[in-house]
Amino acid sequence: MDVLLKVNGTEHRLAVDVRTTLLDALRERLELTGTKKGCDLGQCGACTVLLDGMRVLSCFTLAVAAQEAEITTIEGLAGENKPLHPMQKAFLEQDAYQCGYCTPGQILSAIACVQEGHANSADQIREYMSGNLCRCAAYPKIVAAVQQAKLLMEGP
Amino acid sequence: MPDGNQTIIGQPAIRIDGRAKVTGMARYASDEVVANPAHAFLVTSAIARGRIRGFRLDAARAVPGILDILMHGNVGGEAEKPKPMSGGDTTTTLESDRVWHDGQIIAVVLAESFEAAREAAHKVEVDYEAEPPSATFGSPGVEEEVRKAGEHKDYKVGDAEASFAVAEVKVDARYGTPTQHHNPIELFTTTCEWRGGKLTVYEPSQFVYGLRGSLAKQLRMDPGDIHVVSRFVGGAFGSRGGITARTAWIAVAARRLNRPVRLVATRDQGFTIVTYRAETRHHIQLGATRDGRLTALRHEGWEVTSRPSEYNVSGTETTARVYACPNILTKVNIVHADRNTPGFMRAPPETPYMFPLEVAMDELAVALNMDPVELRRINDTQTDPATGKPYSSRSLMPCFDQAAERFGWKGRNPAPGTMRDGDWQVGWGCATAAYPANIGPAAARVTLTLEGKARVQIAAHDIGTGAYTVIAITAADRLGLEIGKVVVELGGSELPAAGLAAGSSHTAGICNAVAKACEGVRQRLAQAAVTSNDGPLAGQDPAKLTLSAGALRAPGGAAEDLPKALARVTTGVLEVYAENIPKGLPPESIGKVYQGQMAMSRGHSREDATTYTFGAQFVEVRVHALTREVRVPRAVGAFAAGTIVNPLTAHSQYMGGMIWGISAALHEATEIDPHAARYVNDNIAEYLMPVNADVRSIEVIMVPEQDAQVNPLGIKGIGEIGIVGMNAAISNAVWHATGRRIRDLPIRIEDLL
């Protein structure tokens, strides 16, 4: 069926199988491969995107159900030559990844974590970032990155 | 560094590929876009042993959008069985009607969309001729044999049996470690595209030349007609080292459809279509004098493998040489079951084999009423006890001393169950980490341009280790450039060959090759500079000229800017290709890498010295007095691994390794249904791995160490040492907290009730 997806400020009209997930629509149809498939079961968080600013698992969201929302993917945070979002910069500087495959999901989840008000302490960040697995286990540096970016996102 | 005043190697540097990773621009093999792909979905066996009588396909073929179904009956002859890099033989998939293990690939469904392929695959009905399978140790029908000497060997020094019989103090115990699966977050995907007779394969890989060479043999092709692309790898941990069955069938599918085919295997299929860490059992006997000197060490191991494979990791090759001991005896047995073939997983031999040794050492310390650190000190050695060769460097006790100091070890009350914080029983434990310093041959091409930029090309692999960046650092260091002036191309079989990114060998192998190519650049520039009539370096000794800070420099201060120096050689670009053959390997070993075979100089196989990395792990555990929940609030690891090229990414690797060690002790185990020989927790919600909230303070100490013997750059490798010993340190800490000695991993609440 035909769907209209608003991704990173751009409208895309495409025909999808009714079973197509938002994740597969992004990756396979719109070639926005920054959003990653790690389990397709809602277990790893690698496919996290923002829907109207809320973090959701795009593997657990049907494309047809995402039509009303403003969808933000990792590609929507900074373009080729545009400045990085404070969270992207913090992940870069803290080396808050290794292989980098979970990183887009971690960064979008972390932005939402700060905006939700769930980044007030290291313990709270650990808890509210536990939906995003990092098999390389960069966790302590992810916490440090969220703390670094939070200061810039919220001001002193 | 052994040779000089260079300053970029060893300085922390942000990853040169970091921006690509944080913006979603890093193109993993799973992300490669091909035009109009067909989608593949695997059908895997629902039994673990038997034969396939036939398929009923009417329902599957009725699914709109279905294109083709590959099975033994229609494509079985189109590819040969993959050849594993280790262990000889492996199981078949579509080449035969035989079922060797649960979850084996038995058909490949192709359709216009992923959704249609998945639906059709679920509608494939299979008639089996099932036989009762053997799952694991102790199952009826398993076949046990003594592992023959070949890839691995046993050690016999002195008379361990007689010495153990008369030892003043003894430890005699049995241990076990569980099945584990790598579970990298990037799924096991393969995309194949044919153009004429040439095939391009996009697949996450730790060895693109290996994948190319193996696939060429399977498809009976010229390797030159296959191009393997894997620019970024979403985690590997050993799972992407050797070729597995899926690749050839996706290539065959793409040829049949005359169209690109993309496979995204599901998470549960990833438990059975690739390798894993097999479960192990151990019997350890330690004998010692009353003052703590080891007099006897016997270590016998058992490992599970598939029916046809002789794969084993034989970690006794490390446990035989960690401590001074005059009487050593090792033996390894393999147990064939109806399982998929196991393979490398992070510190393949040492994670399971150092666990029993290091718990046994803790038990010995208790029996001797001795501090476990002091027991290691008494038995420390600079001579490999298994062979009598010197260690090229060994900083075990500096690691123990620095980590113990940082941890506050001297505040430990040695009696178990004596440290308590409210409802939590507190325990402190430690263990030795050891891993061989391996290195493989590699080739690299360095191109210098008149704009003062360098391009480095090498078929290396960045599996999260920071390979892009250590290559750039090495080139920048040797060419006297800023890191930002170096462009690195890796992860493709069109590039000069490099070996398997595994065994903590990769940084040593690729950086030494890049340094050698850079040295070729320096020589060409130096020769032109000293033989010029008018240049500032005319008449200088070319051997003494160095490249630093954008200029070619002589010892007395004379210098020429790089563009001018380069202009004496060429008005185009200067390109140097070099091959590095590590000490101990024959010249033809680089040819083996080009052919896709494994070639590695191993830490215990050199003639001149034993080359190993050592470390010390210290950990605090807290066991809840009522719920018996186990937590690890802090860990300190100290490691000495020769030259550290990039301390920033090295820290991440050590830290990640230590967390893997915590996971090996407390989280990870693949549970096996003993009757069906089936993995039951084959997803990453039920296969426990640490999440952010599981991890607290992880401190890493990089103990300075210089080793001019191990290889020219003095690099020992760090990817695996961080995990080794942590599982034992945690078990030892649990004993200290509770008085319970846990010899089987993982440690669960029910072990502490």
Image: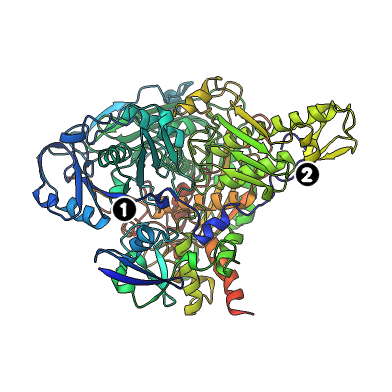
Give left or right: position of B94 versus B455.
left
Residue B73: x percent and y percent? 15, 34
Using the rendered image of the protein, determine whether residue B425 is visible from the camera's viewpoint: no
**Among the two numbered marks 2 and 1 on one chain, the one whose residue lies closer to the N terminus:** 1
| Residue depicted at x 48% and y 65% | A74
Q: Nearer the viewer, residue B564 or A123?
A: B564
Using the rendered image of the protein, determine whether residue A64 is visible from the camera's viewpoint: yes
> Looking at the figure, which quarter contains the N terminus of chain B?
top right
For mark 1, name the chain.
B
Q: Tell me the tag on residue B267.
A: 1
Instruction: Find disc 2 in the rendering and name its residue.
Output: B550
Q: Residues within 10 Å of mark 2 (few under 14, many from 20)?
A: some
Residue B388: x percent and y percent? 57, 22
| Residue depicted at x 50% and y 72% | A111
Q: Secondary structure at mark 2?
A: loop
| Residue depicted at x 30% and y 55% | B683
Q: Secondary structure at mark 1?
A: loop
Q: Tell me, what colour scheme is on the image?
A: rainbow
Mark 2: amino acid: Gly
Q: Nearer the viewer, residue B151 or B117?
A: B117
Residue B335: x percent and y percent? 28, 32
> Looking at the figure, which quarter contains the C terminus of chain B?
bottom left
